[in-house]
Image (spheres, helix red, strand yellow):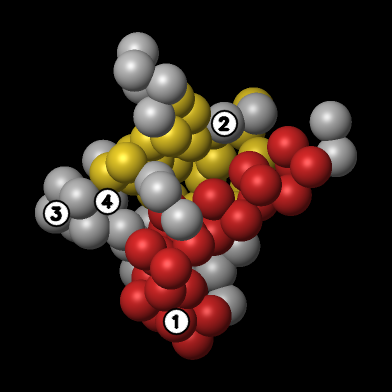
């Protein structure tokens, strides 16, 4: 899990996600599923806010806390797109 502050924070994850052509599937608003093209495994990603009101992102992959993963990147982009259309 990490606190999301801005798009610059996830630049490395963006590059990895673009290389693999990952896409996020919407489960519900704030909950997404991303399939690894390499392994075929699915990862669940949550985008929301903690009790302090900070934007948080959590992925079920084995990335270290505070390090944005490529699955989180595609879920964040999907989440931002959906929120802009509400």
- Residue drawn at x 28%, y 44% is 2
Mark 4 lies on a secondary structure that is: loop
Q: Marks 4/2: CA distance? A: 17 Å
Q: Residues within 10 Å of mark 4 (few under 14, many from 20)?
A: some
**Mark in the foreground, 4 or 2:** 2
Q: Which residue is mark 1?
A: 15
Q: Are marks 3 and 4 in contact (CB under 8 Å)?
A: no
First reached walking from the N terminus: tag 4 or tag 2: 2
The residue sitting at the left extreme is 64
Q: Judge from the rendering whether residue 61 lies leftward or rightward of residue 46; answer left or right.
A: left
**Mark in the foreground, 3 or 4:** 3
Q: Residues within 10 Å of mark 2 (few under 14, many from 20)?
A: some
Q: Residues within 10 Å of mark 1 (few under 14, many from 20)?
A: few
Q: Judge from the rendering whether residue 82 lies leftward or rightward of residue 76; answer left or right.
A: right
Q: Which corner quadrant holds the C terminus?
A: top right
Q: Marks 4/1: CA distance? A: 17 Å
Q: Is residue 21 above or below residue 4?
A: below
Q: Which mark is residue 30?
A: 2
Q: Which residue is mark 4?
A: 61
């Amino acid at each position: 899990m990490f606190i999301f502050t801005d798009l610059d924070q996830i630049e490395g994850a963006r590059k990895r996600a673009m290389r693999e052509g990952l896409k996020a599937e919407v489960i519900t608003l704030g909950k997404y599923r991303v399939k690894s093209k390499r392994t075929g495994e699915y990862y669940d990603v949550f985008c929301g806010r903690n009790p302090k009101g900070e934007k948080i992102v959590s992925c079920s992959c084995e990335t270290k806390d505070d390090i944005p993963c490529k699955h989180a990147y595609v879920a964040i982009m999907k989440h931002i797109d959906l929120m802009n259309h509400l």
